[in-house]
Amino acid sequence: MSYCTQCGAYAGDEAWRRYCRKCFAEQKRQEETSLRERNYELESQIDDLLAEVRRLREKEEIRHVTDVKRVQALLQLCHPDKHGGSELAKSTTQWLLKLKTMLGPR
Ligand SMILES: [Zn+2]
């Protein structure tokens, strides 16, 4: 005969029983809830990782088709000082600098 370790109620004739039916069901319910929460957490982590993989792939594709030395050359060619400070030269320089940052160190 055993008694519930949770509420002290009669748990059953078998000595190995640790919980009464009610507490056992509650225990299971809590386990399921925490598994569901963990599952949800893991699914959202997988989504984040897949997004990161996609981002890295795109970056890698850009790296693949873009030579950082070419970007450097384009930066020199379109320097605003060489184009009377034109808006097009400024915005293109900004874009190229962004691209250079994206390419990062090889
Ligand atoms: Zn109980």
Image: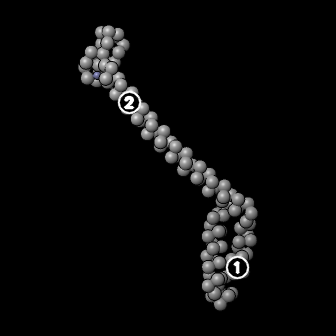
User: Which residue is at the front of the view, 69 or 29?
Assistant: 29
At 73% from the left and 75% from the top, the residue drawn is: 73
* Residue beneath the point at 65% across and 82% down: 89
Q: Position of residue 11 (x, y in %)?
A: 30, 16
Callout 1 amino acid = Gln
For badge 2, the amino acid type reads Arg
Whether residue 21 is situated above or below residue 55 in the rendered picture: above
Residue 50 in view in this figure: yes
The local crowd at label 1, few if under 14, some if 14 to 19, many if 20 or more residues have their Cα within 10 Å, is few
Q: Of callouts 1 and 2, which one flags the residue occurring earlier in the amino acid sequence?
A: 2
Quarter that holds the C terminus: bottom right
Q: Which of the pair 37/100 is nearer the observer? A: 37
Q: Is residue 80 left or right of residue 48?
A: right
Horizontal and vertical percent position of residue 37: 43, 39
The N terminus lies in quadrant: top left
The image quadrant that residue 71 belongs to is bottom right
The Cα atoms of the two marked residues, 1 and 2, are separated by 66 Å
